[in-house]
Image (tube, rainbow, N blue to C red):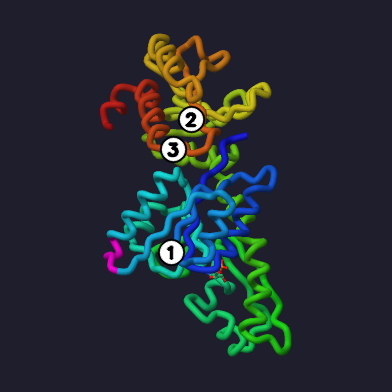
Amino acid sequence: MAEKARIGVLISGRGSNMAALLYASRAPGCPFEIALVAANDPEAAGLRIAAAEGVPTFALSHKGLKRAEYDTILDQELRQAGAHYVALAGHMRILSAEFVEKWAGRMVNIHPSLLPKYKGLDTHQRALEAGDRVAGCSVHLVTPELDDGPVLGQTEVAILEGDTPETLAARVLIAEHQLYPRVLADLVTRETCPEGLLDKVRELALALPAAEEKLSHGMPSFTVSGGKMFCYFTRDHHGDGITAILVKTSGAEEQTMLIEAEPELYYRPAYLGPSGWIGFRIDRGNVDWDHVAEWLLKSWRQAAPRKLADVI
Ligand code: GRF
């Protein structure tokens, strides 16, 4: 199994959603672990829960700091803790667009309404005043606009007669605690499941000039204009359990050197190994996609006719 995805959780108060993520992460098979719990309020109750559970914490009041300064410190802390995703859980501070940009596609938030309804505060009261029959919660990707990013999952919660904002909030919170770990698990496994990985490889490979996809021995493969191959996508070949791309090195020397230098990343593939192809594993989480793109281009250059290769 791939390494667990490391999550930084940002809170401001009670931290019950953080606790839900934390305890879910300790169930067998959960694909994520909590790397850091950070709060912009050193008194946040959730910090004590995290500390007692042996999770690293970071607390820094934002008071007196410029937004950009605060966010830079926070970003450094998250990276030092090895966080690869950020989960906002009752985090009551707006994050700068720069920070959001740095974590694009890797930062999620939980909001106590059925988005796009009732962005912002007082969601339960607004749902009750509107006479809604159902309320609920949403987990969404964070974009610079408040509570606006693509929704990844929602749970509806029926509104009962006589509900007050408090009674409704308490029931929605139960739903939140169920929804958040599940959606987060889906998001992080998308990065390690072969389907998600193929989508990403395909996107990068087909962005190269004249690139075309075809099936070769059951493997999705990429050619230049239907001719020479520059990349194979291999998954569980003869039950080896590996998901990787095969790309062309300059020859046996480079191939051996790379495998010796990084044996957990590179390997010599069966059949194609002798002709200079190398396996580059993408199933270990935290894939460096820029590195993958470089390999695809390098391999493409070897397959492309001179005229075309000279263009880029
Ligand atoms: C939750 O209702 C969450 O949806 C909202 O803030 C509240 C945080 O509660 N964003 P907790 O700190 O997770 O207990």
Q: Residue at x 26, y 27 (%)?
A: 310
Give whichever of discs 2 and 1 has the lower sequence position: 1
Q: Residue at x 49, y 61 (%)?
A: 88
Residue type at mark 3 is Leu
Q: Position of residue 63 (x, y in %)?
A: 32, 69
Label 3 crowding class (10 Å Cα cut-off): few <14, some 14-19, many 20+? some
Residue 222 image label: 2
Task: Tell me the CA gap for discs 2 and 3.
Answer: 8 Å
**Region in magenta:** 64-68
Q: Position of residue 155 (x, y in %)?
A: 66, 67
Q: Position of residue 30 (x, y in %)?
A: 64, 46
Q: Is residue 86 left or right of residue 253?
A: right
Q: Quadrant of the C terminus?
A: top left
Q: Label 3 belongs to which residue?
A: 206
Determine whether label 2 and label 3 are within 8 Å by CB: yes
Q: Residue at x 60, y 59 (%)?
A: 19
Question: 201 or 140, which lies in front?
Answer: 140
Q: Label 1 belongs to which residue?
A: 42
Label 2 crowding class (10 Å Cα cut-off): few <14, some 14-19, many 20+? many
Q: Position of residue 149 (x, y in %)?
A: 47, 64
